[in-house]
Image (tube, rainbow, N blue to C red):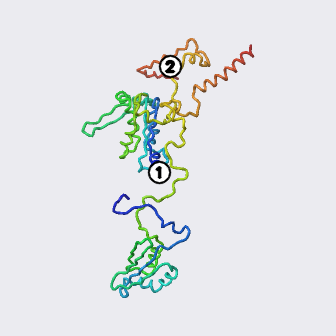
Amino acid sequence: MSNRAIPNAFVKNVLQNGLGRYICQLQRVTLNFCKATPSSLGTRDFIEKYLVDFTRENPGTVVYVKPIRNRAPFLVAEYLNGRQERVSTKDMPADEVCKWLEHLRTRSGAQIVNLRKEWLTNTPSTQGVWHPFLNKNPSLAGTSFPAPELYGAKTESKSATDMVLEEAGVKKVGSVDSASSKE
Amino acid sequence: MATQRVLQWRAFARTWWLYDAANQCPFVSAYRVVPYLQGKHKPIFHPLSDVGDHVVVINTKDIAMQADYWRTFTFFHHTGYPGGFSKASAWRVHEIDPTRVMQLSVYSRIKGNLLRKGLMRRLHLFPDDKIPDEILENVSDQIRQVQPVAKRLDQYSEEEVTEFPKFFDWPEDFVKDGYKRHMTRKKPKRRYTV
């Protein structure tokens, strides 16, 4: 986590993309492959089977197909924010190339980094920032400390003295009454 | 915005709390005090942010211990050198320094990590209620005590004592306890009954 070599940043979205309308951030993808070597076999299959469908479904994305001789195949995706992503498709079957291309298509183009926090807000809190004096009794400002009447422990049960006094109060009245009636 | 900066200062301002340890158990009091030192009572608490408060503890010479803990509870210490072990019972430690028992109970309550010494420096202990003015002027609130303080007999006025209700009178031949404790307790003789 606390590594200076690995970049870290906060969560971000490209200009609230998708809130009103969605703009595909992938602007151009280049499929580099060799016409002869077996490491490009899956990539060549992909171009034969699926590439036309991909271009029909994504008219906003430019697709370049670029033969290179005797080199391992790779995809280069260029995004609206100016960044490039490069994925090696060496020895991959056509399905896997398809998955990687889908991955590149759905990305925002922002660099993948360690997230410092999984949340972010640009709008300040509606109820205001918390502070230590929130919901405090204002009379504390005028109190001189220590104020023993403020910090005594709360007791819900009665003490023995209270119970005795209560009992005695009842008994006193009763005893006087009974004594007078007897007399 | 300039006000945002001020709001930040206000949110992270340290509060100074007062805690009266008179007639309070030091171990239970440590449970009450330590969250304030760590800042765990705040909604903005995060283990990586330094949001602990100051706690001023007064009247530590009047702390109360349950049962006969003053005699039986022992504090241990080792200097790290051979033969550096020493121990002292609670009453002895209290006699040497009346703030020490409270300090040790709070110290042992805090987890032993790098924050502990910093948190302990925000704990201000005073044997009585005499606090320096520069500390007292910071105090803005009080921590509630952990146990109710009973009123002693000598704190009642003579009227209150004489007018306290009596349920019955002692018989004339009844011997009241003189509040003297027998230092050597005799073992009761065993009586064999048929």
Q: Residue B107: horizontal and vertical position, in percent? A: 38, 39
Q: Residue A112: horizontal and vertical position, in percent? A: 41, 67
Which residue in the protein does label 2 denote?
B154
Q: Residue at x 45, y 51 (%)?
A: B2
Say which amino acid is labelled 1.
Gln
Say which amino acid is labelled 2.
Asp
Q: Dividing the picture into quarters, in which one does residue B132 lie?
A: top left
Q: Are marks 2 and 1 in contact (CB under 8 Å)?
A: no
Q: Residue at x 43, y 78 (%)?
A: A29
Q: Is residue B75 left or right of residue A139?
A: left
In this view, which residue lies farthest toward the top?
A: B172
Mark 2 or 1, closer to the camera: 1
Q: Residue at x 39, y 44 (%)?
A: B111
Q: Mark on residue A8?
A: none
Q: Is residue A169 left or right of residue B51?
A: right
Q: Earlier in the sequence, mark 2 or mark 1?
A: 1
Residue A17 vertical position relative to residue A180 in the rendered view, above or below:
below
Q: Dividing the picture into quarters, in which one does residue A101 lie?
A: bottom left
Viewer-side residue, B142 vs A93: B142
Viewer-side residue, B6 vs B23: B6
Residue A121 vertical position relative to residue B134 in the rendered view, above or below:
below
Q: Residue B63: horizontal and vertical position, in percent? A: 44, 30
Q: How would you rate the neighbour count of disc 2 (Cα within 10 Å): few for under 14, some for 14-19, many for 20 or more?
A: few
Q: Mark on residue B4?
A: 1
Chain letter for mark 2, please.
B
Viewer-side residue, A4 vs B186: A4
SS state under label 2: helix
Chain letter for mark 1, please.
B
Viewer-side residue, B134 vs A31: B134
Q: Residue B149: horizontal and vertical position, in percent? A: 51, 29
